[in-house]
Amino acid sequence: MNSSFDSFIKYFLPLFFFIYQFVLFYFRSYKVYKNTGIKPFVFGRSSSLHDFLGKSFLLVNLLNLTGILIYSFFYRFYNYTYPFLIHEYIYLRLFGFSLLLSSFIFLL
């Protein structure tokens, strides 16, 4: 393992997650609202597919945040979350990191 890369990722992942979520939801929504005058994310309490998918997406984001926080700040519990051992190879980690950054650039 590359310990300097691990320590960098432990602090970078939570910061990146919050910035990515901000840009993805707030910034893009603000641009749509400014251009059209319509709020893009409106979820009601009905049983429509749109509301179900919105709630499901929220749950997935909360699970992602939980996994990132456990990895970054409570690493001793990380082994109990059934991590994929293939992600421990440094080349795959660097490839994943490059995908992470390229997705952010694509979002902008």
Image (spheres, grey):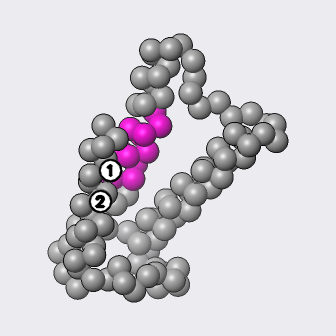
Secondary structure found at label 2: helix
Q: Amino acid at mark 2?
A: Leu
Q: Which residues are magenta?
A: 15-26
Expressed as whole percent of the image width and height from the top left, the position of residue 74 reads 44, 74
Mark 2 and mark 1 in contact (Cβ < 8 Å)? Answer: yes
- Left or right? Give the position of 45 relative to 41: right
Return the residue nearer the eye: 62 or 74: 62
Residue that mark 2 sits on: 99
Element marked by disc 1: helix
Residue placed most toward the observer, 18 or 82? 82
**Quarter of the figure with residue 71:** bottom left
Q: Residue at x 22, y 77 (%)?
A: 91
Q: Position of residue 81 (x, y in %)?
A: 52, 80
Q: Residue at x 37, y 57 (%)?
A: 14
Question: Badge 2 local density, few (<14 within 10 Å), some, or many (20+)?
Answer: few
Residue 9 seen by the camera: no
Question: Majority secondary structure of the magenta segment?
Answer: helix
For marks 1 and 2, give the CA distance.
Answer: 6 Å
The relative height of residue 29 versus residue 83 in the rendered view (above or below) is above
Residue at 53 percent of width and 13 percent of height: 37
Specify few, some or many for label 1: CA neighbours under 10 Å numbering under 14, 14-19, or 20 or more. Answer: few
Q: Position of residue 49 (x, y in %)?
A: 74, 43
Say whether residue 20 is magenta: yes
| Corner quadrant of residue 96 | bottom left
Q: How many marks?
A: 2
* Residue identifier under label 1: 103
